């Protein structure tokens, strides 16, 4: 076999390994802000749902909200081909918001496809305007359940434990940033009208920054860099073998 053919074969095998290691990082259901999610303010966030199935479509998404750090408001942006239902629950302890006592908070949002849903090889963003974000928390954990039209259910509900490896089905986590130096958050309070909420989401999308990258991207980068090391080593071994054979033949 010629040297070029051997190296091409090694490259093909390593390329397959890169894809195999990188793919799982993109398959997680994640949540990211459109811009910034500052403590004490409002934010528009996207729940991003990739389809892991080769033959089935995602037709339902249920996102449970944390009740230990309750959110009084959550307004989903209208999405063509989907319906959205916001469920609220009574709080064990009322909270004060803008001088008013709040006795219930958002406990769940359920999106249901009215058409084909999210097909294989695609993903869908589910934007939500939410607040007021807690001032005494560093992150919010949302547990998500993804349902396919063949009956399969993916439960993204495992909470990452400090010092341990990422779980197989991690729950989406929204990192909260500090409020600005003037003591105000960068988010704006949404209107009570759904159409206004949708407008807020569109405006926020236009100001999306590099911070909007998936939290999984850093994990993917680490995986790819590791595989690149394997590639370099494999090519070195291939050249060594070929050089040895040439000396033998000489």
Image (tube, helix red, strand yellow):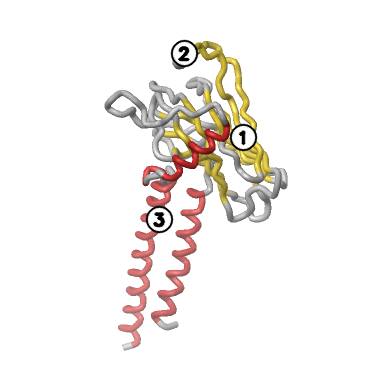
Question: How many numbered circles are shown?
Answer: 3
Q: Quadrant of the C terminus?
A: bottom left
Q: Secondary structure at mark 3?
A: helix
Label 3: few (<14), some or many (≥20) within 10 Å?
some
Q: Which residue is mark 2?
A: 96
Residue toward you, 90 or 223: 90
Q: Secondary structure at mark 2?
A: strand
3 or 2: tag closer to the N-terminus: 2
At x 36%, y 69%, the residue is 235
Q: In the figure, 246 relative to 88: above or below?
A: below
Residue 160 coordinates in the image, percent (x, y)? 46, 34
Left or right, 19 with respect to 55, comes to left
Residue 183 coordinates in the image, percent (x, y)? 31, 23
Residue 199 coordinates in the image, percent (x, y)? 51, 38
Q: Which residue is mark 3?
A: 224
Left or right, 53 with respect to 214, comes to right
At x 37%, y 72%, the residue is 238
In the image as oriented, which residue stretches furthest toward the bottom?
250
1 or 3: tag closer to the N-terminus: 1
Q: In the figure, 174 relative to 137: above or below?
A: below
Q: In the figure, 170 relative to 137: above or below?
A: below
Left or right, 214 with respect to 111, comes to left
Q: Which residue is mark 1?
A: 62
């Amino acid at each position: 076999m010629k040297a070029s053919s051997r190296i091409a074969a090694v490259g093909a095998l390593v390329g397959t390994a890169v894809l195999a290691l990188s793919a799982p990082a993109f398959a997680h259901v994640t949540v990211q802000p459109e811009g910034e999610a500052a403590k004490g303010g409002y934010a528009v966030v996207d729940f991003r749902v990739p389809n892991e199935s080769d033959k089935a479509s995602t037709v339902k998404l249920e996102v449970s909200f944390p009740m230990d750090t309750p959110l009084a408001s959550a307004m989903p942006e209208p999405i063509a081909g989907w319906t959205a239902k916001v469920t609220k629950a009574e709080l064990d302890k009322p909270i004060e918001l803008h001088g008013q006592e709040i006795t219930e908070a958002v406990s769940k949002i359920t999106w249901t496809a009215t058409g084909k849903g999210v097909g294989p090889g695609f993903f869908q963003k589910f934007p939500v305007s939410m607040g007021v974000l807690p001032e005494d928390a560093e992150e919010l954990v949302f547990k998500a359940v993804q349902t396919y039209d063949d009956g399969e259910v993916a439960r993204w509900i495992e909470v990452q434990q400090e010092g341990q490896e990422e779980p197989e089905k991690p729950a989406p986590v929204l990192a909260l940033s500090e409020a600005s130096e003037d003591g105000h958050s960068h988010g704006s309070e949404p209107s009570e009208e759904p159409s206004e909420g949708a407008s807020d989401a569109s405006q926020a999308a236009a100001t999306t920054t590099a911070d909007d990258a998936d939290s999984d991207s850093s994990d993917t980068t680490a995986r790819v860099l590791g595989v690149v090391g394997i590639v370099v080593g494999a090519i070195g071994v291939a050249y060594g073998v070929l050089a040895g054979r040439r000396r033998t033949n000489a």
